[in-house]
Image (spheres, rainbow, N blue to C red):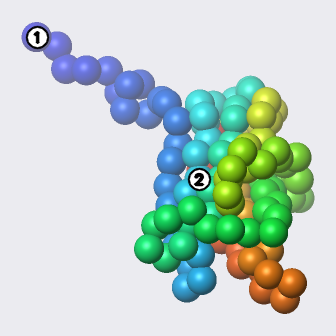
Amino acid sequence: NTAPGRASEESGPFATVVKTDELWFDVLVDPATVGTNDVHVTALTTTGTAAEVQEMEVTLTQPDRDIAPIDLPSTPLGPGHVVADDVQIPIAGDWVITASALVDDTTQVTGEAEVTIR
């Protein structure tokens, strides 16, 4: 009868939904640890359904260490859904992931999430 270890609460993928007035961004970083990670970002309508976007760019930065935005080359997987496979995150700490979606020829929507890499 021992309590579960804290590591089980602190490890595993990071997932969140970033809400803006125009779009929501469903963000998943797996496993959210130093080393190789997969980053999925899905643009959603404000009702939570997949949004059609012309393109999406994803960057990663760590402001505390003045690490400039790193472009994450991503592959489209479906409507509004991109994945950046095998992203190397070399340093633990709080990182900011930014998704920018081009909705139409004149509208770009950007959302940011902070993810802790262990």
Question: Which residue of the protein is positioned furthest toward the bottom in this rendering?
Answer: 106
Residue 1: give its label.
Answer: 1
Instruction: Kindly identify the residue that appears in the image at 51 percent across and 48 percent down.
Output: 15
Q: CA distance from mark 2 to mark 1?
A: 36 Å
Residue 27: give its label.
Answer: 2
* Viewport quadrant of the N terminus: top left
The percent coordinates of residue 27 (x first, y second) are: 59, 53
The percent coordinates of residue 5 (x first, y second) are: 32, 21
Q: Is residue 70 left or right of residue 61?
A: right
The amino acid marked with disc number 2 is Val
- Tell me which corner region of the image, top left, top right, bottom left or bottom right, holds residue 83: top right
Q: Is residue 74 visible?
A: yes
Q: Which structural element holds mark 2?
A: strand
Q: Is residue 111 left or right of residue 89?
A: left
Mark 1: few, some, or many residues within 10 Å (few <14, many ≥20)?
few
Instruction: Kindly identify the residue that appears in the image at 52 percent across and 36 percent down.
Output: 13
The percent coordinates of residue 87 (x first, y second) are: 79, 35
User: Measured along the vertical axis of the image, is residue 114 above or below residue 104?
Assistant: above
